[in-house]
């Protein structure tokens, strides 16, 4: 987990506020992902990026945007937070090489939207 | 629509017993089936994975059984230990090169001493 860090770890915000969750990795991986985890729903992919110039929507991208500032940094933004975006958010990375299938997850950000 | 269906939602097993978690899928294009283990306050971590060209993979006390014709796969934890208490997610990857995973809904396993 230490190779993939997420900030903040916990955040409380109000409906309508803009919020950014940040992810950094020291693994040197090209691929980065954002997931949200909800009880009873598992993990669902929000966005993913294969390199700095590549951004792709996942299953549930509505209401979210991302920015890949560098190979090591991938940020998730909620432009106008709403209560049903309350969830646990995970960043993950994977390599392009031999072990590309394994995704390495950060420790998560717990977000509460009031 | 859940691409990977997982059961049971929760499981309580005695120490030394066998824990079994089941998953099913519909998309025959899936080409890689990992299991992730998540402890409280941590992110998921890869536990074991299998490809559809084999029917079983074993790593220590953990075994994946894969039934391609039934489109089902399961995780067996032999000699379950209290330290195995965690949430387990099955997943499947689409064969599009994107390496995107579709996760099951998770199983919370509790191993009691």
Image (spheres, rainbow, N blue to C red):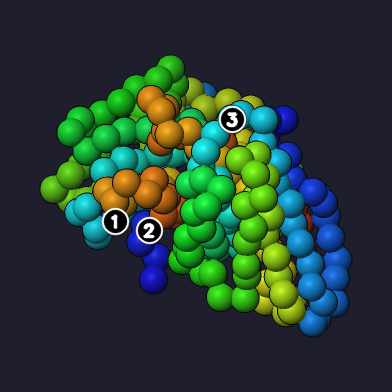
Q: Nearer the viewer, residue A79 or B4?
A: A79
Q: Residues within 10 Å of mark 1 (few under 14, many from 20)?
A: many
Q: Nearer the viewer, residue B63 or B27?
A: B27
Is there CB contact under 8 Å for labels 1 and 2?
yes
Q: Is residue A5 above or below residue A84?
A: above
In the displayed structure, does residue B59 sit left or right of residue A57? left
Same chain for marks 1 and 2? yes
For disc 2, the marked residue is: B5
Q: Chain of mark 1?
A: B
- Is any part of residue B106 visible from this angle? no
Residue positioned 51% across, 69% down in the render: A60
Q: Chain of mark 2?
A: B
Same chain for marks 2 and 3? no
In the displayed structure, does residue B15 sit left or right of residue A96? right
Q: Is residue A43 above or below residue A106?
A: below
For disc 3, the marked residue is: A28
Residue positioned 61% across, 29% down in the render: A27
Q: Residues within 10 Å of mark 3 (few under 14, many from 20)?
A: few
Mark 2, mark 3: which one is toward the viewer?
3
Where does residue A66 sit, x and y in percent of width and height?
Answer: 62, 61
For disc 1, the marked residue is: B25
- Is any part of residue B81 visible from this angle? yes
Q: Residues within 10 Å of mark 2 (few under 14, many from 20)?
A: many
> Judging from the image, what secondary structure is the residue with disc 2 in?
strand
Q: Is residue B101 above or below residue A18?
A: above
Q: Chain of mark 3?
A: A
In the displayed structure, does residue A105 sit left or right of residue A6? left
């Amino acid at each position: 987990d230490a190779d993939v860090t997420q900030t903040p770890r916990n955040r409380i915000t109000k409906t309508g506020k803009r919020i950014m969750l940040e992810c950094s990795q020291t693994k040197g991986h090209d691929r980065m992902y954002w997931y949200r985890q909800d009880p009873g729903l598992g993990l669902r992919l929000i966005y993913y990026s294969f390199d700095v110039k590549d951004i792709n929507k996942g299953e549930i991208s509505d209401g979210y945007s991302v920015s890949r500032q560098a190979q090591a940094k991938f940020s998730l933004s909620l432009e106008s937070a709403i209560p049903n975006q309350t969830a646990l958010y995970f960043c993950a990375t994977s390599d392009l090489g031999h072990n590309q299938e394994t995704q390495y997850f950060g420790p998560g950000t717990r977000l509460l939207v009031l | 629509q859940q691409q990977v269906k997982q059961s049971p939602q929760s499981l309580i097993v005695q120490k030394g017993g066998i824990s079994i978690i089941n998953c099913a899928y519909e998309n025959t294009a899936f080409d890689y089936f990992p299991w992730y283990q998540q402890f409280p306050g941590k992110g998921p971590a890869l536990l074991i994975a299998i490809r559809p060209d084999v029917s079983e993979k074993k790593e220590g006390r953990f075994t994946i059984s894969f039934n391609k014709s039934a489109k089902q796969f399961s995780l067996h934890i032999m000699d379950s230990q209290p330290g195995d208490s965690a949430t387990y997610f099955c997943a499947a990857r689409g064969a599009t090169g994107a390496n995107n995973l579709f996760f099951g809904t998770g199983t919370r396993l509790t191993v009691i001493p």
